[in-house]
């Protein structure tokens, strides 16, 4: 029997409210699509063990609230992420327009080796498309992101998005570009649990 | 679990877990055992001692794993909660994989040939083909296990452990079996030799080859009797073969029985995980050799029956059969039915039974027995024969069997592994604590100075495990929430289905009012409620705050020409009011309302409803309703008391007390006050002097007024709890009052 898993990668999913971040998480971890999912007010958490180059890797995925008012708070969850999935909704241009802000946050708050993947979600609603593939693809190229259009509803490209990111992170680890323990984003072995984003208060209630 | 794909070093672990996983496969065994023994007329009774194959339970390398995980965590601290430990995962996957073995393995029929020959010290002379390549064998066996006894009867072999005699015999074997075979292992104990060969195509599926020897007799030192064992795993089936030579002579039945038990007890193998197993911890155990059991009948009678080929009735007298039937030895072993003449004792080189003086009665000394573990499928009998090689006084014997092995189909195993991992994911995701929260938005609506407002959140554990929750600070913050908010409880534990009510209370006093009254902050916050090992909830807090002169600062108040509600403050650099107009309004209204004459003004408390109305009017600029002078007097006191920084600032508190006995130092201190404070101070002193001038009516004295006003004008910072505690001491109260009294008395002289 080999290790249940050899590495743990921390992912964050970010992007505007309603672009389908939680649906992507559920589709990936449970193969389930829940329509009318309530907005995430906080940070949800899911795990899945995947295979990369015959290594078992556990993905720890933090799905963050997209609302603008929580922006300052969700920033605290970026730290140490090995992968960031930056999601927009192909049927709502506004969510695409906000990518620059999200990307700035992601770049500032994660380390330089963090793999950022751009995901145009709701591919199943091609009829209501508001952002072309080409445009987003160009944006991704300009910013050095990998890009994929997916549908959390049909599951199309969901697996690919998560796995592609994992492969790139793994490659990075193998090439020695990434320390194994930057804030717990990539860890070897088995025992990482979600920990609060900030320090514990000291004997202090308020 | 196939040990061939397991390169990891596995620490010794839990073998008891195998019981539950392997016991599921027992049902088919009995039926198979029946078929295997149908031809055996009086065959041996299988009582079957329970043995489990424990060495191949795929328990993960838990401790290796843990130590790695441990290394990587020195930076991260202790993970909160430990129920998802490494062992649980690894073991769970291993167990599940074992349970589903039938899904990713295919049954293969394999044949094994077991031969035994007591060569009576002879060197090889004739080819072994008649024995090893018997045309009666339907197939070429996949495995050959060939045992010899009395290979070497020389004293050297006995005493010095010389084993050179085995080589010619091994050479002879190779000449007979085709070159499609490779040797797995051979082992010799003096005259006892066991060699095992396998077809080359299966070589890679032979794993964990081990051997051991056991001697019997006095001190176990003389190696002429005893046993040699070889064990290995063939695909996923564990096989043990034991070749033995037990004690001779007709009457030595008990000796032989004891030999058998000693050998069985002493043979041990160290296998995976440093587990030590015995012969009986195998799926298939074969016991071959010159067991030396005899037929206790008169020589003539035996020979007569042999002549008539009445092996059945002869066999009923066979000592081994009798011992097995009574359970005295070889418990649980089986033997194929014997349909051949006794193999001992011949005149070497002839077909004639012992013609020497001793005239030993013919016997079935040379036997092949097997025992299948309860959890494995029984073997199928192919042949059980003797072979006509004449050079020894024994004839060689062979038994061949079909063994069902399970071969792993790697692609399917991998797929099933993936499925199991996925199940684990789901299990793990399900085992995360989950809770629902009654609301993510708490609106305190209108919040007033020093009026607590409480709202509640109900948290319910809707997960399957205990949920521990706590509020945690945001990034780069040290506190859980803004200082005007209290959370109770701020951490706790909930059993599944349990609910907990969390109280959130807003309370703004002079320590926290600055933010709203002066810094113009809005009343909002976001709380993070963290479930250990689970998600975080954000709770938005909001409330509305109307600017008020209570809990304000003098500096700020003099910037408002109009009421605080609805007026913008003047820019800092512009001309300011000399004192807050709210203070002037209150003092002025007391004058107009003949308050100076009110008995015990500032001593008697006001009417709370009126107090609230007056406060409201001060902030909105509306005229005061009808009020009692005591109410207005109390609002003045409350106003001064609520100032974020008192008229004599916190920073000068200690200095004021220290110099309270000396008029001059008090005056010096006051002369250094900021201008607004200075103005307010003398405005109040003039007012108090005026009040005192009506002492005939209001019965007040300088002492009384000084005590009341010093309490609010001269107070310690609330953050300095030591000073706060002292401030009610009589000596301190007196010092504070003294400070004020200097001014009331000498006012006219300033």
Image (cartoon, coloured by chain):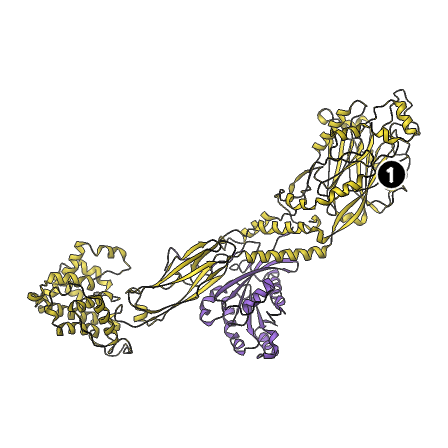
Chain colours: A purple, B yellow
In this picture, residue B212 sits left or right of residue B122: left
How many marks overall?
Answer: 1
Q: Residue at x 44, y 61 (%)?
A: B529
In the current view of this chain or complex, which residue is farthest to the left? B696
Whole-percent x and y of residue A186? 56, 59
Whole-percent x and y of residue B116? 83, 35
Mark 1 nearby-residue class (10 Å; few <14, some 14–19, many ≥20): some
Circle 1 is placed at which residue position? B172
> Is the residue B154 above or below the residue B242 in the image?
above
Secondary structure of residue under mark 1? helix
Whether residue A102 is visible, yes or no, is yes
In this picture, residue B692 sits left or right of residue B322: left
Whole-percent x and y of residue B749? 8, 68
Whether residue B483 is visible, yes or no, is no
> Is the residue B739 above or below the residue B386 in the image?
below
The residue lying toward the viewer, choosing from B358 and B611, is B611
The residue lying toward the viewer, choosing from B39 and B4, is B39
Task: Output the chain of dot 1.
Answer: B
Q: Residue at x 11, y 72 (%)?
A: B594
> Is the residue B722 above or below the residue B550 in the image?
above
Where is the C terminus of chain A found, in terms of image quarters? Answer: bottom left
The residue lying toward the viewer, choosing from B406 and B85, is B406
The residue lying toward the viewer, choosing from B138 and B575, is B138
| Quarter holding residue B576 | bottom left
> Is the residue A42 above or below the residue B120 in the image?
below
Whole-percent x and y of residue B361? 87, 24
In this picture, residue B236 sits left or right of residue B390: left
């Amino acid at each position: 029997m080999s290790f249940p898993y050899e590495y743990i990668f921390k992912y964050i999913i970010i992007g505007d409210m309603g672009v389908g971040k939680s649906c992507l998480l559920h589709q990936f971890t449970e193969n389930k699509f829940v329509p009318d999912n309530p907005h995430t007010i906080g940070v949800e958490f899911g795990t899945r063990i995947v295979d990369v180059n015959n290594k078992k890797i556990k993905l720890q995925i933090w799905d963050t609230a997209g609302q603008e008012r929580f922006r300052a708070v969700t920033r605290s969850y970026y730290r140490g992420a090995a992968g960031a999935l930056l999601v927009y909704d192909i049927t709502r241009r506004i969510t695409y327009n906000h990518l620059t802000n999200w990307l700035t946050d992601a770049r500032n708050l994660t380390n330089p080796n963090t793999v950022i993947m751009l995901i145009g979600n709701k591919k199943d609603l091609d009829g209501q498309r508001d952002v072309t593939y080409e445009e987003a693809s160009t944006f991704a190229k300009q910013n050095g992101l990998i890009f994929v259009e997916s549908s959390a509803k049909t599951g199309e490209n969901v697996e690919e998005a998560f796995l592609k990111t994992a492969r790139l992170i793994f490659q990075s680890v193998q090439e020695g570009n990434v320390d194994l323990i930057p804030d717990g984003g990539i860890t070897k072995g088995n025992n990482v649990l979600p920990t609060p984003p900030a320090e514990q208060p000291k004997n202090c209630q308020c | 679990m196939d040990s061939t794909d397991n390169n990891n070093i596995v620490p010794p672990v839990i073998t008891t877990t195998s019981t539950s996983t392997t016991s599921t496969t027992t049902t088919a065994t009995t039926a198979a055992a029946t078929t295997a023994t149908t031809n055996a007329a009086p065959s041996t009774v299988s009582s079957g001692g329970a043995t489990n194959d424990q060495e191949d339970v795929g328990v993960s390398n838990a401790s290796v794993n843990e130590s790695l995980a441990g290394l990587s965590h020195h930076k991260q601290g202790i993970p909160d909660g430990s129920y998802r430990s490494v062992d649980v995962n690894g073991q769970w996957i291993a167990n599940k994989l074992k349970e589903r073995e039938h899904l990713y393995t295919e049954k293969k029929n394999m044949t094994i040939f077991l031969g035994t020959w007591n060569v009576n010290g002879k060197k090889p002379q004739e080819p072994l083909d008649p024995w090893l390549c018997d045309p009666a064998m339907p197939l070429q066996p996949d495995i050959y296990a060939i045992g010899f006894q009395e290979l070497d009867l020389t004293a050297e072999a006995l005493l010095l452990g010389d084993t050179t005699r085995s080589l010619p015999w091994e050479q002879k074997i190779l000449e007979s079996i085709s070159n499609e075979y490779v040797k797995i292992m051979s082992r010799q104990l003096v005259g006892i030799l066991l060699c095992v060969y396998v077809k080359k195509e299966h070589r890679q599926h032979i794993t964990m080859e081990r051997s051991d020897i056991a001697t019997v007799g006095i001190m176990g030192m003389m190696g002429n009797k005893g046993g040699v064992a070889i064990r290995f795993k063939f695909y996923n089936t564990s096989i043990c073969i034991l070749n033995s030579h037990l004690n001779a002579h007709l009457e030595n039945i008990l000796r032989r029985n004891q030999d058998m038990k000693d050998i069985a007890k002493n043979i041990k193998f160290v296998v995976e995980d440093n587990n030590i197993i015995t012969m009986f911890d195998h799926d298939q155990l074969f016991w071959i050799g010159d067991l030396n059991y005899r037929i206790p009948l008169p020589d003539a009678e035996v020979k007569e029956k042999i002549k008539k080929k009445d092996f059945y009735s002869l066999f009923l007298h066979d000592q081994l059969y009798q011992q097995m039937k009574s359970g005295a030895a070889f418990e649980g072993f089986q033997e194929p039915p014997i349909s051949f003449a006794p193999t001992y004792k011949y005149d070497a080189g002839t077909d004639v039974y012992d013609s020497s003086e001793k005239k030993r009665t013919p016997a079935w000394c040379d036997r092949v027995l097997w025992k299948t573990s309860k959890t494995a499928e029984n073997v199928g009998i192919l042949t059980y024969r003797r072979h006509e090689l004449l050079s020894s006084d024994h004839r060689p014997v062979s038994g061949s069997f079909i063994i069902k092995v399970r071969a792993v189909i790697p692609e399917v195993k991998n797929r099933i592994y993936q499925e199991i991992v996925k199940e684990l994911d789901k299990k793990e995701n399900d085992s995360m604590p989950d809770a629902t929260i009654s609301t993510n938005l708490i609106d305190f609506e209108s919040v007033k100075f020093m009026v607590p407002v409480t709202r509640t959140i109900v948290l319910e554990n809707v997960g399957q495990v205990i949920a521990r929750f706590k509020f945690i600070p945001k990034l780069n913050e040290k506190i859980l929430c803004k200082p005007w908010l209290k959370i109770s409880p701020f951490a706790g534990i909930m059993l599944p289905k349990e609910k907990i009510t969390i109280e959130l209370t807003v309370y703004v006093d002079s320590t926290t009012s600055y933010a709203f009254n002066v810094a113009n902050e809005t009343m909002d916050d976001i709380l993070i409620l963290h479930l250990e090992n689970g998600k975080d909830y954000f709770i938005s807090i909001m409330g509305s705050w109307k600017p008020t002169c209570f809990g304000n600062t003098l500096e700020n108040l003099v910037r408002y020409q109009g009421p605080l509600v609805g007026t913008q403050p003047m820019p800092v650099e512009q001309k300011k009011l000399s004192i807050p107009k709210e203070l002037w309004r209150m003092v002025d209204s007391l004058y107009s309302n003949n308050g100076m004459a009110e008995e015990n003004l500032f001593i008697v408390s006001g009417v709370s409803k009126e107090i609230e109305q007056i406060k409201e009017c001060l902030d909105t600029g509306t005229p005061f309703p009808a009020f009692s002078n005591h109410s207005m007097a109390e609002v003045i006191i409350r106003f001064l008391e609520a100032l974020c920084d008192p008229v004599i600032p916190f920073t000068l508190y200690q200095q004021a007390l220290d110099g309270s006995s000396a008029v001059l130092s008090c005056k010096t201190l006051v002369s250094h006050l900021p201008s607004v404070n200075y103005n307010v101070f003398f405005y109040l002193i003039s007012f108090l002097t005026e009040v005192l001038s009506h002492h005939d009516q209001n019965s007040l004295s300088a002492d009384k007024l000084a005590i009341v006003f010093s309490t609010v004008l001269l107070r310690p910072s609330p953050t300095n709890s030591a000073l706060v505690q002292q401030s009610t001491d009589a000596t301190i109260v007196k010092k504070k009052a003294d400070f004020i009294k200097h001014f009331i008395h000498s006012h006219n002289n300033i």
